[in-house]
Amino acid sequence: MTDKDLTSGSPWTTDAMQKRLKKRYRKEAIFKAVGLSGLLIGLCALAILVISIFTTGLSGFKETRLTIDVYMDPAIIKATPDLDEDARTAHMARVNHRALIRNSLRLEFPDVKSRRDIMALQRLTSNGARDEVRQGLIDDPTIIGKTIPMNLRASSTVDMYIKGQISRDVAQSSRKISDKQLVWLDKLSAEGRIVKGINWEFLSSGDSREPELAGILGAAVGSLLTLLVTLVIAFPIGVATAIYLEEFAPRNKWTDMIEININNLAAVPSIIFGLLGLAIFLNVFNMPRSAPLVGGLTLALMTLPTIIITSRAAIRAVPPSIREAAIGMGASRIQTQLHHVLPLSMPGILTGTIIGMAQALGETAPLLMIGMVAFIVDVPEGILDAATALPVQIFLWADSAERGFMEKTSAAIIVLLFFLVLMNGLAIWMRHKFEKRW
Amino acid sequence: MLISSAAYFIGRRKALQSVQGDVRQLHSLPGHYGWFSAMTSLLPGMIIILTWIIFGPVIIDNMTLASLAGLEGGEKIQSLSDFDRAIYLNDIHNLAIGDAISRPATDNLTFAAQYYLRAQQDIFWIFSLSAVAISALTATLGIRKISPTMRSRNILERLILSCLALCSILAILTTVGIVSSLIFETLRFLDHVSLADFLLGLKWSPQTALRADQVGSSGAFGVIPLFAGTLLITCIALIFAVPVGLLSAIYMTEFASRGARAVFKPLLELLAGIPTVVYGFFAALVVAPFIRTSGDFLGLEIASESALAAGLVMGIMIIPLMSSLSDDVISSVPQSLRDASYGLGATKTETILNVIIPSALPGIVSAFLLAASRAIGETMIVVMAAGMAANLTANPLEAVTTVTVQIVALLTGDQEFDSAKTLSAFALGLALFVITLILNFIALKVVRKYQEQYD
């Protein structure tokens, strides 16, 4: 039989068969396209999410300042030269800074007369501008009586207008900034006295009711303290459990139960852990509410299963030959573990721990349960102080009615994502660096 | 601590001395003897300090209250109810540290506060001295026991082993803690509301009346609307996530080149790493307004907190879970099955649909169950994007609320711990726990059974 015979005699050459084959190939192409589109939908969602967060969030790192010639009116400051350093600082803090700014603004815009307009004029600057004038006075008392150009922080509304988030085409009644204020701003901007810069205070101060003054340092420190507690508790206990279950535990009903338990705990919704923290740590042990200690304990219980499971995998990956060699040299089983198996599996364990910590960093719901949602201005100083965490701060800001908080929320999300990427990157780097093929 | 480290060195030296520096005659390494004596001093000391931390405050409180009994009006305090007593004690504590208190500072109160401070100091000294003394004592006892034949390594290792075992029991303890706290609070909740009302009630409005004569806020605790809302949102999420997740898993395992897979897989897993609060913000900021405006465009009335928005975003969240789990099961289908199918002349698509999917089905089902349990327990997305009011509806365009939203709403903000409102959160939590547990359990069972097939 020749090739020709084979093809001509076989049913593959018939029209019906060719048609069917074509249909099958078409189906193949369609299915492949459908599969690809599934993947692309997922990736699109990711892209939209990241892009929308970044477009709204990047402006949150910027700020607007107004250059105002502030006249340090001795009549308002009323400082006496004979005060010593401390008394002078205390006096400067009590000065009516608001009046200083108001009078300077009135000098700037002499045609503004009515009380209401002056109030509106003052509202161009933020409440934080007062602190800036005070700081200026404390730093250099010789400026009293002089007129100093200062870059004062603009209010959130002005800030949003300058960033283009409030359009002037809308009717006056439906925007927060009035026509008069716009005219004043135009004048300032024509004189080149609107300065845009990077908002360092966003990274270096605590929360505030005013969007332009709010910062995330307090929340970041709260997160850090919480994670420290989580790490200190979850890491040793997780590793010890993993060693015990993997190397020492007898195979019986009891250890089987522990194993099933751990697997189930890994899938329990995080909010349940929050309820546990509320019922046990707060109501039974009377620990302080809103404290990073309680948050850390709760998150530690939540991340334990993750750490245990990854640590077990890492310990299992150490080849038995290492153990046999150690035991052959006369080491006891504990010595084998502590001196040989554990150091060898440490990179894997640490990778798992970092991933668990990243999970804990992004977790919000359990922290809501134990009351870490309070409005807290101060940066926490210890694990017993009231604190919030980064994700909780995001939640609080996202819930806030002030529109100025929207970009702050996105900016805080960017900071949170930055930390998460950093941690996951570290985990991946470690996995590559220490990966061993036995 | 100091004593223990001293004991370590003394113990080690003594062990060495006893054999005149000839290490070979010792049973264990010198360090073991050191650790042994350190442990003998550390453990009793730790036990005392722990007792102090746990029972110290109680002892002091009782002493303070007892000291008041002799004073004028002191008998009254003995007869107070537990709750009032707690408040009274709280005042004493606050006065002692100089905080604001809830009542005028009477002489009794100031006396008690002073007594409290003094007692606290005294007891602190007693405990710390006794801790030091006992650890010193046990350390000397331990050191005296050291001799070349003593098997200190074995003792030490037994200790370490029991520590390890103790740690692993913590996992059990966590579960016991969850279950017992939830059940305990739920039982208290059932004192207020009957089980039938809770499970079968069609109305959820947890605002109990502040005054007895208030109208319309008697409090209704029917969970049906909550579970209906949860189910609705979960279904929307799964309808979106399961096809997308499954298809991308199939594409990545069967069609994509190695290089494409190396790019796409981490990208998709990036979705899993994004905190849920970010998804919630995304839902409220982008998705909900988008759905609303497109609804306006089509002439549909869509609530700004529609179930659709929350469900869609939740779907995005569980795509990576779904895809990576099904990815695992699909790639664990033996290559021989594929080869056999190709050998029979099947195309790739036919192989996937007729061979791979059926044999991976148990794994895919369990991935589906895990995704569902994840969606049911998800909190932040729905808190930020779904509604607050309970609404029994199957219309995805309306606002519904979920179990997790209600738990958060009930437990954040001011709360008194005994009200039915707060306790109902724990009952909801228990229901949530049981449901997710059952789903996970079935999923794990299915996976385990499936694994046995090919091993």
Image (tube, rainbow, N blue to C red):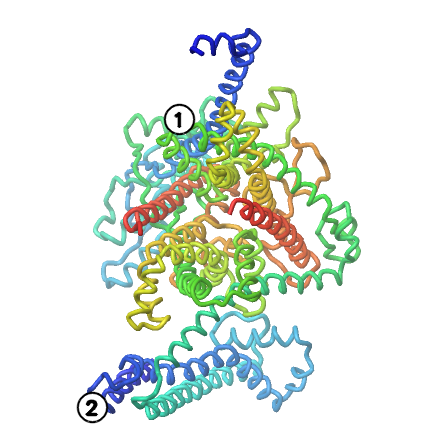
Circle 1 residue: A183
Q: How many marks?
A: 2
The spot of residue A298 in percent (x, y) is 50, 60
Under circle 1, the secondary element is: helix
**In this picture, residue A198 sits left or right of residue B312:** left
> What SS does tag 2 mark?
loop
Mark 2 lies on residue: B20
Q: Residue at x 71, y 34 (%)?
A: B394
Q: Is residue A429 left or right of residue B177?
A: left
Residue drawn at (35%, 73%) of the image: A332
Horizontally, is B420 left or right of A307 in the view?
Answer: right
How far apart marks 2 and 1 lie (CA) works out to 96 Å
Residue A172: percent from left, percent from top: 50, 26
Question: What's the chain of the residue with tag 1?
Answer: A
Q: Is residue B146 above or below residue A246?
A: below
Considering depth in this image, is A128 or B434 the residue closer to the camera?
Answer: B434
Camera-near label (2 vs 1) is 2
Q: Where residue A20 sits in the image (x, y, percent)? A: 56, 13
Q: Amino acid at mark 2?
A: Gln
Up/down of B143 relative to A4, above or below: below
Looking at the picture, tell me which residue is in the foreground, A131 or B324: B324
